[in-house]
C-alpha cells in the first residue's frame, strides 16, 4: 500500500477512503478521524492503524507535531508526583512504560538520567518526605532521600546552599521530535491517511456520520476523535458541548549550548510549591541543557513568543541552581503552551451516542502519556459501538537517532563506507550529514519547511543557528521540493 | 570497520586565511608533512562569501574581493606544498595530539607532532543575544545571509533591518541591496557613528543609535523589529528580514573539548605571542583567538605562527606557568593574553584590544602586583567593535613569577 499524505488542494475522492466499509453507496466515509496530529493524536492514529479501519489523521499545520508537542521539556516522567488516583497518574505511569519500550524498539533516544528534587531551604527540605510518600502512593518505589553531601557528590556544579534532595532514578529524557514522527510514520505506513494544512472549521453531526468542513474541503467520518490540543475546546463546542475551556499556560525555556552538558547530570527539579512546579534545569537528549519553563496563564492560543521578563527571571533562577550555566552560550529560546483547563486532571470524555471522544486538557505530561492515552481511547471507542476487528502487527519503524548518547551517522565507519553521504557534514554544530538530510526529505512523512527538517535531523539546531549551514540546508530543502 | 590511523608532522584545523597562512609558511619552511583540514567542500573560510572588496589592502576599499582573496590563500598554501583536504571535519580528540575526523572517504584518527587550531569565529545569532519575541523565518546572521545570496542565490525578502553598525553590518547591508532588498534601518545600541557610513558613498540608510531591539514579531514570516530608543520611545520597524551582525564568538568547541584554558574576555583559547595555547604542542591562530579581526590579520598571524611551531618541532619545549594578562572594565579583552617566558613580542609589536563602551582619548595603565609597567594615551577614541592597540615594548618589565598583569583605563 502506498502511503497517503496530502498537503494541499481540495481533498478529492482519490485522497479519501473508497467505498464505505459496509459496501454501501454514498460519499466516502472514514471510520475514524483524529483531529490534531500532535503527539497525542499521532499516538491515537497509530493505535487505530492496527485495525482494518479507514482512519484519517488531520492537522491544521503543515507538519505533524507542530503544536505544543514540538516545544516542551522532553521529560519522560515517572508520574511520581501526579495526583494519586487520577486518570493522569495512571496514564503517565502506563504511558511511560509503553513509550520506554517503544523507544527501545524504534530507536527513539531515551536517557535515564534520573531526577533530583533539590531543596534550597529548610521548608523545602521538610517537604521532601511527603513527596516521597506521594511517590509511593503513585506506585513509584525507587525514590529516596539524599543528604546535602550525597547531593553535592552527584551534582558538583550545583549552586551553594542546597540542603538535600529527593532522588527519582527513573525520570528520563526523551526526543520530543522523533516520538510523534515515529507514531505518524507507522500509522501512515499501515494505511492511515494523513491530511496536513487541513484545519477543521465546522462540524455537522448527523445520525451516523460527522461531516467535517475543513480548509481543504469536506470529509465524512463515523467516529470522531478530538485531539486538537489548545483548540480542543473549540471543536468540542462545534459538537454542542461546553465541557471545558482551554486556557493556554505558556512555558518559556532557554536552551544552552552542548558545551554546558558536563555541568549537570540529572534533571534538577525544584520542590513544588503553591505557585506551581517551578523552574528546572535538565539535560536534553541532543546534549544541551534546558532552563525553564515559566508558567504564565494567557488568553492567546498563538502566543508562543518569548519575553524579556521571563528570560530575566529564568536566568536569575538558573544562576542559583547552576551558576556556571549562565556563562555558557545560549542556543535557543522558545516557548510552548500547555492546554490547561482549570482542572488538574485531563479531560478525556467519550460520548458513545455521538460517536465522539474528546481528548482534552492534555496539559503537561502528554508526551509521556501519549501511548497510554491512545490505548485508553481505543477502549473507549470499543464502548461506543465500533467493532474494530482483530488487531494486526504494525509495520516496524526505525527512527534516525538524534540522540547524542547513541552513535550518530558521522561516527559510523561502516555506514559511511556504504554511503559516503553520511560522511559529508552539512550542519557542523550538530554534525548532521547530507545522508541524514536526504533520508528525512524522502521519508514517509517528509518535512514541509526547513523547520520541519530541523526537527527530523537537528540540522540548523545548533549554536550557530545557521551562520555556517543555514543557506546550504535551505538549498537541500528547496532542491528536494522541485 | 574502524578509523584509519595516520601521523603527520603538523595538522592544521581550519582552512580559512589563518590556517592557510600557517600551512603555506610551515610547508615552505620544511616542517615535513603539513596537512590542513577544512570541513567545507571549498577552502578559504569566511572570505569565500564576502563578495565585497577590502580584503588584504591597507586602505579603505583597497585590496581584492573575498572570494579572490580566499582563492589566493588556497593557491599559496598548495603551492608551498601544504596538503589541503576539504570536506574533512575534525570532530574531537582521541589524545593530547590526536584528533578524530569524519569525511565522505571515511573516519580517521590523526596524530601530529604539533596542531594548529584555526577554526575561526562566528556571529552570535539572535537566540544567543536573548532577543525575545516570536521565532519566524527571515532572521539571519551576516554569515548565513552572504552564503544565501552569494553562494546559493536564494531569495531573501523585501525589507530588511540590520542590527549592528560595524563594518560587517555594512557588508550585510550591501549584500541585502544586491539581493534587491530595501534596507530600512541599521540599529545599534551604541551611539550612531557616521564613520562606517562615510566609507560607503551613497549609503543613505538611517542609523538608529543608542537603540535596542526589544522583540521580533510575526509568525509565518517576520513582520517587524520592535525597538526602544534611549529616550524611552518605542517603535516597530516593519520588515520581513533582519540580520544580526557582529557580536563575535570564537568557534572554540575543539579548544574547549581539548581542555585548553580559555581567556574569559575573548572566549578563545588563552595564548601567548608565539601562539602557544595551554595545551602542549597546540597552537592557535586567527579569529579563534579574537572574534573578529580582518582577514589580512588572520593570515599574518597564521604565517607568524610558523616560526614558533618549527621551534617547537625542533626543541619540544613548552612553557608552563605563564603570566596571564587581563583587562578591567570597560575594556573587553586583550589578545594575546598570556606572557611567554621568552619575551617574544606579538604581531606588529602590539596587543589588540576591544572595549565595551566608547572611550575618548583613553589613558592605559599596565600594572603587575601594584607595580606600574607602562602607561600610554591613545589619541583617537576607542569605540566598541573596532580594534585598538597597545604597544608591547614593556614586556621585559614583567616579573615572570608575578601575578596577573592588569590593564586599566583612565
Ligand atoms: C513548556 C511545556 C513543557 C512540557 N514538558 C513536558 C514534559 O517534559 N513531558 C511530557 O510528557 N509532556 C510535557 N509537556 C506536555 C506535552 O507537550 C503536551 O501534553 C503534548 O504535546 C500535547 O500534545 P497534543 O497532541 O495534545 O497537542 P498538540 O501537540 O498541540 O497537537 C494538537 C494539534 O491539533 C492541531 N489542531 C488544532 N485545532 C485543529 C483544527 N481545528 N483542525 C485541525 N487540526 C487542529 C494543531 O495544529 C496541533 O498540531 C509540556 C508542555 C509544555 C507547554
Ligand atoms: C560577513 C563578514 C565580512 C567580513 N568582511 C571583511 C573584509 O571586508 N575585509 C577583511 O579583511 N575581513 C573581513 N572579514 C573578516 C575575515 O573574514 C576573517 O577575519 C577571516 O576569515 C578569519 O580567518 P580565519 O582563518 O581565522 O577564520 P575563518 O575564515 O572563519 O576560517 C575558519 C575555517 O575553519 C573551518 N573549521 C572550523 N572548525 C573546523 C573543524 N572542526 N574541522 C575542519 N574545519 C573546521 C571552517 O569551516 C572555516 O573554513 C569579514 C568577516 C565576515 C563574517
Image (cartoon, rainbow, N blue to C red):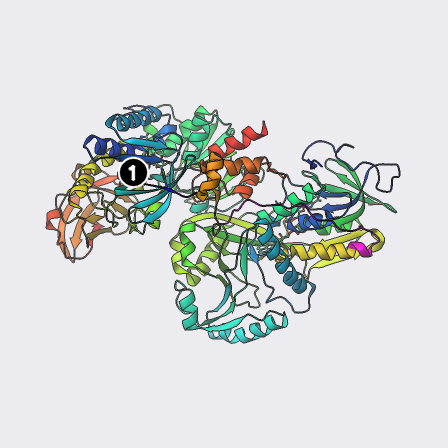
* Residue B356 visible at all: no
Task: State the quadrant of the N terminus of chain A.
Answer: top right
Image quadrant where residue B88 sits: top left
- From this view, report whether residue B403 is shown above or below residue A146: above
Q: Quadrant of ligand 2?
A: top left
User: Magenta span covers which residues?
Assistant: A381-405
Instruction: Give how far across and how far down residue B296 sits, in percent.
Output: 26, 31
Q: Chain of mark 1?
A: B
Mark 1 within 8 Å of ligand 2, using the beta carbon: no
Horizontal placement of A256 versus A302: left or right? Answer: left
Horizontal placement of B220 versus A352: left or right? Answer: left
Task: State the quadrant of the C terminus of chain A.
Answer: top right
- In the image, A80 versus B287, the foreground residue is A80
Query: Please, what secondary structure does the residue beneath circle 1 have?
Result: strand
Instruction: Give how far across and how far down residue A189 sits, in percent.
Output: 68, 41
* Residue B271 visible at all: yes
Q: Is residue B12 magenta?
A: no
Residue most toward the left?
B396
Amino acid at each position: 500500500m502506498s502511503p497517503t499524505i496530502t498537503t494541499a488542494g481540495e481533498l478529492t475522492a482519490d485522497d479519501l477512503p473508497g467505498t464505505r466499509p459496509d459496501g454501501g453507496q454514498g460519499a466516502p466515509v472514514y471510520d475514524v478521524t483524529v483531529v490534531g496530529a500532535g503527539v497525542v493524536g499521532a499516538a491515537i492514529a497509530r493505535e487505530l492503524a492496527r485495525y482494518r479501519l479507514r482512519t484519517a489523521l488531520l492537522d491544521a499545520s503543515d507538519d505533524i507535531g507542530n503544536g505544543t508537542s514540538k516545544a516542551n521539556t522532553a521529560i519522560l516522567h515517572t508520574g511520581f508526583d501526579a495526583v494519586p488516583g487520577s486518570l493522569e497518574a495512571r496514564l503517565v505511569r502506563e504511558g511511560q512504560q509503553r513509550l520506554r519500550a517503544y523507544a527501545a524498539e524504534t530507536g527513539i533516544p531515551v536517557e535515564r538520567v534520573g531526577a533530583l528534587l533539590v531543596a534550597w531551604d529548610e521548608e523545602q527540605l521538610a517537604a521532601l518526605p511527603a513527596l516521597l510518600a506521594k511517590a509511593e502512593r503513585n506506585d513509584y518505589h525507587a525514590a529516596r532521600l539524599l543528604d546535602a553531601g550525597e547531593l553535592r557528590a552527584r551534582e558538583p556544579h550545583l549552586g551553594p546552599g542546597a540542603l538535600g534532595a529527593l532522588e527519582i532514578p527513573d525520570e528520563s529524557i526523551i526526543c520530543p521530535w522523533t516520538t510523534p514522527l515515529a507514531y505518524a510514520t507507522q500509522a501512515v505506513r499501515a494505511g492511515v491517511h494523513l491530511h496536513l494544512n487541513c484545519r477543521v472549521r465546522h462540524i455537522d453531526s448527523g445520525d451516523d456520520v460527522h461531516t467535517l468542513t475543513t480548509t481543504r474541503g469536506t470529509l465524512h467520518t463515523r467516529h470522531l476523535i478530538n485531539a486538537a490540543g489548545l483548540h480542543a475546546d473549540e471543536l468540542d463546542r462545534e459538537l454542542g458541548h461546553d465541557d471545558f475551556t482551554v486556557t493556554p499556560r505558556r512555558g518559556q525555556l532557554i536552551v544552552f549550548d552542548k558545551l554546558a552538558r558536563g555541568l549537570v547530570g540529572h534533571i534538577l527539579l525544584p520542590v513544588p510549591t503553591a505557585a506551581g512546579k517551578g523552574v528546572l534545569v535538565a539535560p536534553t537528549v541532543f546534549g544541551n541543557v534546558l532552563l525553564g519553563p515559566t508558567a504564565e496563564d494567557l488568553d492567546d492560543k498563538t502566543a508562543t513568543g518569548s519575553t524579556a521578563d521571563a528570560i530575566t527571571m529564568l536566568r536569575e533562577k538558573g544562576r542559583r541552581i547552576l551558576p556556571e550555566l549562565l556563562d555558557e552560550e545560549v542556543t535557543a529560546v522558545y516557548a510552548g503552551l500547555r492546554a490547561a483547563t482549570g482542572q488538574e486532571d485531563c479531560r478525556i470524555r467519550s460520548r458513545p451516542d455521538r460517536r465522539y471522544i474528546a481528548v482534552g486538557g492534555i496539559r503537561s505530561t502528554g508526551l509521556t502519556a501519549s501511548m497510554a492515552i491512545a490505548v485508553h481511547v481505543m477502549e473507549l471507542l470499543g464502548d461506543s459501538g465500533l467493532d474494530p476487528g482483530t488487531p494486526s502487527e504494525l509495520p516496524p519503524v526505525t527512527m534516525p537517532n538524534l540522540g547524542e548518547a547513541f552513535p550518530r551517522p558521522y561516527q559510523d565507519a561502516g555506514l559511511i563506507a556504504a554511503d559516503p553521504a553520511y560522511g559529508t557534514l552539512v550542519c557542523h554544530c550538530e554534525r548532521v550529514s547530507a545522508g541524514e538530510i536526504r533520508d528525512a526529505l524522502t521519508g514517509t512523512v517528509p518535512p514541509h519547511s526547513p523547520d520541519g527538517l530541523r526537527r527530523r535531523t537537528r540540522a540548523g539546531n545548533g549554536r550557530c543557528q545557521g551562520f555556517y549551514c543555514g543557506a546550504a540546508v535551505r538549498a537541500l530543502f528547496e532542491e528536494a521540493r522541485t | 570497520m574502524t578509523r584509519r590511523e595516520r601521523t603527520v608532522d603538523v595538522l592544521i584545523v581550519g582552512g580559512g586565511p589563518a590556517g592557510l597562512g600557517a600551512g603555506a609558511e610551515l610547508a615552505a619552511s620544511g616542517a615535513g608533512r603539513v596537512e590542513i583540514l577544512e570541513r567545507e567542500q571549498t577552502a578559504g573560510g569566511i572570505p569565500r562569501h564576502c563578495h565585497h572588496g577590502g580584503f588584504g589592502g591597507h586602505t579603505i576599499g583597497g585590496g581584492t574581493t573575498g572570494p579572490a582573496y580566499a582563492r589566493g590563500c588556497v593557491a599559496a598554501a598548495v603551492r608551498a606544498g601544504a596538503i589541503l583536504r576539504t570536506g574533512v571535519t575534525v570532530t574531537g580528540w582521541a589524545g593530547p595530539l590526536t584528533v578524530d575526523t569524519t569525511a565522505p572517504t571515511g573516519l580517521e584518527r590523526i596524530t601530529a607532532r604539533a596542531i594548529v587550531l584555526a577554526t575561526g569565529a562566528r556571529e552570535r545569532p539572535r537566540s544567543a543575544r536573548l532577543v525575545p519575541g516570536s521565532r519566524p523565518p527571515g532572521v539571519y546572521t551576516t554569515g548565513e545571509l552572504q552564503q544565501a545570496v552569494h553562494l546559493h542565490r536564494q531569495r531573501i525578502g523585501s525589507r530588511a533591518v540590520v542590527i549592528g553598525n560595524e563594518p560587517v553590518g555594512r557588508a550585510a547591508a550591501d549584500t541585502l541591496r544586491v539581493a534587491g532588498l530595501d534596507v530600512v534601518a541599521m540599529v545599534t545600541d551604541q551611539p550612531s557613528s557616521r564613520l562606517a557610513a562615510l566609507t560607503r558613498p551613497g549609503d543613505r540608510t538611517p542609523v538608529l543609535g543608542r537603540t535596542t531591539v526589544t522583540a521580533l514579531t510575526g509568525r509565518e514570516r517576520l513582520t517587524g523589529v520592535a525597538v526602544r530608543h534611549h529616550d524611552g520611545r518605542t517603535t516597530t520597524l516593519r520588515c520581513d528580514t533582519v540580520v544580526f551582525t557582529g557580536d563575535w564568538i570564537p568557534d572554540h568547541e575543539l579548544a574547549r573539548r581539548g581542555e585548553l584554558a580559555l581567556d574569559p574576555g575573548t572566549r578563545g583559547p588563552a595564548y601567548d605571542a608565539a601562539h602557544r595555547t595551554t595545551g602542549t604542542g597546540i597552537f592557535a591562530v586567527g579569529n579563534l583567538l579574537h572574534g573578529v579581526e580582518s582577514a589580512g590579520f588572520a593570515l599574518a598571524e597564521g604565517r607568524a605562527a610558523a616560526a614558533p611551531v618549527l621551534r617547537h618541532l625542533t626543541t619540544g619545549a613548552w612553557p608552563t606557568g605563564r603570566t596571564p594578562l587581563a583587562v578591567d572594565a570597560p575594556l573587553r579583552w586583550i589578545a594575546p593574553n598570556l606572557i611567554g617566558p621568552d619575551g617574544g613580542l606579538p604581531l606588529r609589536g602590539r596587543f589588540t584590544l576591544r572595549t565595551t563602551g566608547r572611550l575618548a582619548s583613553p589613558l592605559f595603565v599596565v600594572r603587575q602586583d601594584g607595580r606600574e609597567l607602562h602607561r600610554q594615551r591613545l589619541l583617537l577614541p576607542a569605540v566598541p567593535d573596532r580594534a585598538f592597540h597597545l604597544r608591547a615594548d614593556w614586556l621585559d618589565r614583567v616579573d615572570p613569577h608575578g601575578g596577573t598583569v592588569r590593564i586599566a583605563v583612565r
